[in-house]
Image (cartoon, rainbow, N blue to C red):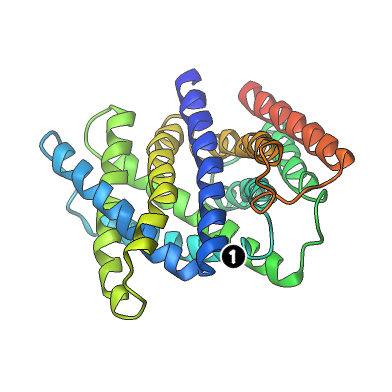
Amino acid sequence: MLFGVIMGSIAAILQSTSYVFSRLFITRHKSPLYLTIYSQLAMGIMGLIMFAILCNFTTYPLSWKYTLLGLAWAATYVSAQISFFMALKYVEASRLSSLLGTKIITLALITMLLGNTLSATKWIAVVLCCISAVGMNFTGGKLTLKSCLWIGSAVLSYALCDISCTEMIHMMPGDNITFNSFCVVAVSYAALGILSLPALFFIPVKKELFIGSIPFGAAWFLSMNFLLTGFGTLGVVYGTIIQSGRGIASVLIGAGLLYFGFDHLEPRVGKKAWLRRLVMATLMLIAMTLYAKG
């Protein structure tokens, strides 16, 4: 379990870092669509390199179920990324990062519909995690209806995406969860990169757009390797609670950006707002501990 917690925590830090890079790209180029496509191409190259290495040591399941799960993952991932980047036009990265912690409620409900039950202690942890994520985000500007709709779309899409890729991991041969997770990341992002190529016929093909997407793509791709390992080890619900620690990481990163004068990436708020974010981050840690004990 400790291994899964460590993997999930590393993923949370890397994801929080990737959100800053995505905010930087959108601030410069004003296009969530360009970031979605070019980052998928960048991650596709990373995935192809990784796939070329790993396929020498394993075989992938050639079944309709695995293929359909892969297609479901791709569709929900693209939906989630576009929704997230659109939300970034209205909400700063640190607030949006932690607000995605509400995904835990969505995942808990979906897993319950699929026949899995959670103990009372685990449900308390899920609720505390959600409260922390929401409470952390009533500390900045007002959330508009449009931003809430994009956030809701991102949360649902990411939840379905997580369930799909976790099932793909458990269908891989062998018992090494870390290796199986890396294999799923490699084939998924390699395929997504290839499927994204036709989009270049409909958007400007510019070297600076591709280069500008690489920092986000690299941080996100690395985070997925650690995150899927956490999902495979802990399960998708507990793994998501650990992932929600990105809210804590985002608060710290946001404070660092403000300290060094990058307020175009992280708008300034009062001390009361930062104190509230710190309290909610502590509540997030309590939720993680409760779920582990449950």
- In the picture provided, is 164 more to the left or to the right than 32? left
Q: Residue furthest top?
A: 2
In what quadrant of the picture does the C terminus appear?
A: top right
Q: Residue furthest left?
A: 56
Comparing 226 with 201, the one in front is 201
Specify the amino acid type for callout 1: Ser
- In the picture provided, is 225 more to the left or to the right than 50? right
- In the picture provided, is 286 more to the left or to the right than 60? right
In the figure, residue 26 lies in which quadrant? bottom right
Q: Residue furthest front?
A: 261
In percent of width and height, residue 112 lies at 59, 48
Q: Residue at x 64, y 39 (%)?
A: 250
Q: Residue at x 75, y 28 (%)?
A: 282
How many other residues sit within 10 Å of disc 1, few (<14), some (14-19) or many (≥20)?
some
In percent of width and height, residue 284 lies at 71, 33
| For residue 182, above or below residue 211 | above
In percent of width and height, residue 55 lies at 14, 41
Q: Residue at x 37, y 62 (%)?
A: 208
In percent of width and height, residue 20 lies at 56, 48
Callout count: 1
Q: Is residue 74 visible?
A: no
Q: Residue at x 36, y 77 (%)?
A: 203
Residue on which the image places disc 1: 153
Q: Secondary structure at mark 1?
A: helix
Q: Residue furthest bottom?
A: 202
Comparing 220 with 290, the one in front is 220
Q: Is residue 146 visible?
A: yes
Comparing 270 with 81, the one in front is 270
